[in-house]
Image (spheres, grey):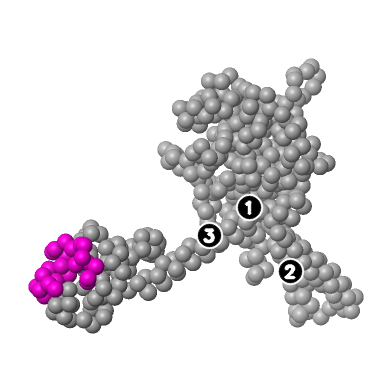
Amino acid sequence: MPTQRLVGSRIREKRLDRGLRQAAVAETVGISPSYLNLIEHNRRRIGGKLLADLARVLGVDTSLLIDGADREMLDEMRSAAAVSGGQAEVDRTEELAARYPGWSRLIATQARRIEMLDEKLRVLTDRLAYDPQLAGSLHEVISAVSAIRSSASILVGTEELDQDWQRRFHENIHKDSVRLAASSEALITYLEAPQTLVEQAGTPFEQVESYLAKTGFHLAQLESDQPDVARVVNEAGFTGAAAQHFQTIAERYAGDAALLPLGPFEKACRRTGYHPALLAQEFGVPLATVMRRLAHLPRDKDHPPIGLAICDASGALTYAKPVPGFSLPRSGGACPLWPLFGALSRPLQPLRLDAVLPAPNSTRVLCYAVAEPQGLAEFDFVPPLQSTMIVFPDPPEAEKAPRPIGVSCRICPRIDCASRREPAFMGIIGKTGL
């Protein structure tokens, strides 16, 4: 029923809430009970002085009879109903809000709180899955607990041990308990530290990427025809190795921007559907250059989120731009199935992979990767390789089923994966009973 047709229903609800007889209300406002009955059943439109008189008799504001419940509150109630799986009578939301405003506000408030808690849970889940330092700290804590439990189970077993062996197991428990205390303290310190201190305490790579994350990985100062790289580097405020690394990043960024000017490149991206190979052919530049440029598009221009990862020939990450649903651990142990690493064995051959990450997020990603030699070609010299990969989260559905892929072996739930290189936390936790 349209909103404007519910005025009569609201009048009837307010009258019944206050225990007023229809005849008494009609007499007070100067109309017949039968006419008021038609109004209350939405068979007569109402406005002007009569509406104001009825609102005064019912003790409510006129706007409440006209507009009903607050639009924002109604939207929140409908959203809560949608999340519940369609069990609520959504078509009667406005009627519920008008008849029971207190309960309706409570529903809306609880819906907001549930949404906030869900977001916190998602953030914590993502942090556990993608934060390499947190994953390493948890691994150390669980390893120490496992060692202590193993030694203690032998000591309390039925088999008699001589004094020498008992002393050795006691020493092992002591050493492992000290290791557990130290690793637990380090974990608590990391979790409680402000995010700014965590960023400042990272490696030079992590410090630079934390700075770039605040700009959306887009350096507008380097998009001009004559970019002042030295000024950009100086304003960033880095020192030591971080400053040198940012200098390299800024110079490469300026070079990419010169080859692929932002305006024409953005138009070509939308025209080609952000396809890196088509863009490389159109502009006549290396594929890796296009990939870096795609990942550094301004985030306020309605471009899709695009992740970026760059590694050297050893597979060590030298640059990473995470996006929702995609992030690789910098401390090692990244899933070997990412085409970023597969490209190293096939230089200059572009790779494409439609993949899906494990639960709980189960994000689908479309990856493009290529490994290219760096520097000028020389005789009797093998140039170093650099692999570049971009990632599009939640791409359009493909004809073939996406290939399962993980983030890190250490936290991947796919225990039976043939490419696994180290035990997962899940297996360790299951064996220790934690």
Mark 3 or mark 1, earlier in chain: 3
- What numbered label is drawn on residue 119? 3
Judged from the image, the secondary structure of the residue bearing numbered disc 2 is helix
Q: Is residue 297 visible?
A: yes
- Amino acid type, mark 1: Tyr
Judged by depth in the image, the label closer to the viewer, 2 or 3, is 3
Q: Residue at x 79, y 22 (%)?
A: 381
Write down the quadrant of residue 78 in the picture: bottom left
Q: Looking at the image, which residue is at 55% across and 48% down?
A: 325
Instruction: State left or right for residue 12 relative to residue 196.
Output: left
- How much space separates mark 3 and mark 1, taking CA atoms? 16 Å
Report whether residue 85 is seen: no
Residue 32 screen position, x and y as percent: 10, 73
**Measured from the top left, where is residue 180 in percent x and y?**
78, 68
Residue 354 inside the magenta-drawn segment: no
Q: Residue at position x 74%, y 55% from top?
A: 197
Q: Amino acid at mark 3?
A: Glu
The residue at the far top in this view is 379
What residue span does the magenta drawing correspond to? 30-54
Q: Which residue is mark 1?
A: 130
In percent of width and height, residue 206 lies at: 72, 46
Quick check: 331 left or right of 108?
Answer: right
Q: Which residue is mark 2?
A: 145
